[in-house]
Amino acid sequence: MTTTPEEYQAKAAETLVQLAEAKTDSERLRLKRAHGCFMKLATHGAEAAARAAMRPAAKIRPEKPAAAIRPGQSYFK
């Protein structure tokens, strides 16, 4: 199960609503931290997708057969 940046942004918005209704300082602090975590996760996912799109394509390299060295054969030719 993967969570998309949009889902994290929805969770962050939900924590802001809960923050407005919070009654104790410890609850406010917990919700502020949760909001920050959700925002970081949302932006990190979007940035990772952007970095992947900017990455150059992988080089195409031909497959080479492994050179087998027989007993008694020198590494140097």
Image: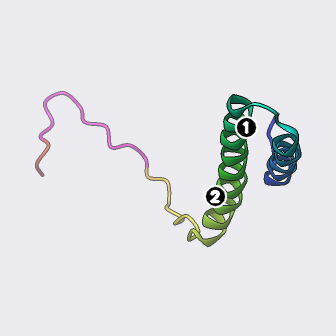
In front here: 50 or 8?
8
Disc number lying in front (1 or 2) = 1
Q: Is mark 2 on a helix, strand or loop?
A: helix
- Residue 2, by quadrant, is top right
Q: Residue at x 25, y 36 (%)?
A: 69
Residue at x-position 24% and y-position 32%: 70
Left-right relation of 26 to 68: right
Q: From what the image shows, is residue 13 above or below residue 59?
A: above
Q: What element carries label 1?
A: helix
Q: Nearer the viewer, residue 56 or 48?
A: 48
Number of residue marks: 2
Amino acid, disc 2: Ala
The mark that comes first in sequence, 1 or 2, is 1
**Residue 48 pos. (x, y %):** 63, 58
Which disc is residue 28 wearing? 1
Say which residue label 2 marks. 48
Whether residue 59 is in magenta: the answer is no
Q: Residue at the location (14% across, 43% down)?
A: 75
Q: Is residue 62 above or below residue 8?
A: below
* Residue 7 on image: x %, y %: 86, 47
For residue 59, above or below residue 39: below
> Could you say which is closer to the camera, residue 46 or residue 8?
8
Q: What stretch is highlighted in magenta?
A: 65-74
Q: Which amino acid does label 1 sit on?
A: Arg
Quarter of the figure that contains the N terminus: top right
At x 49%, y 53%, the residue is 63
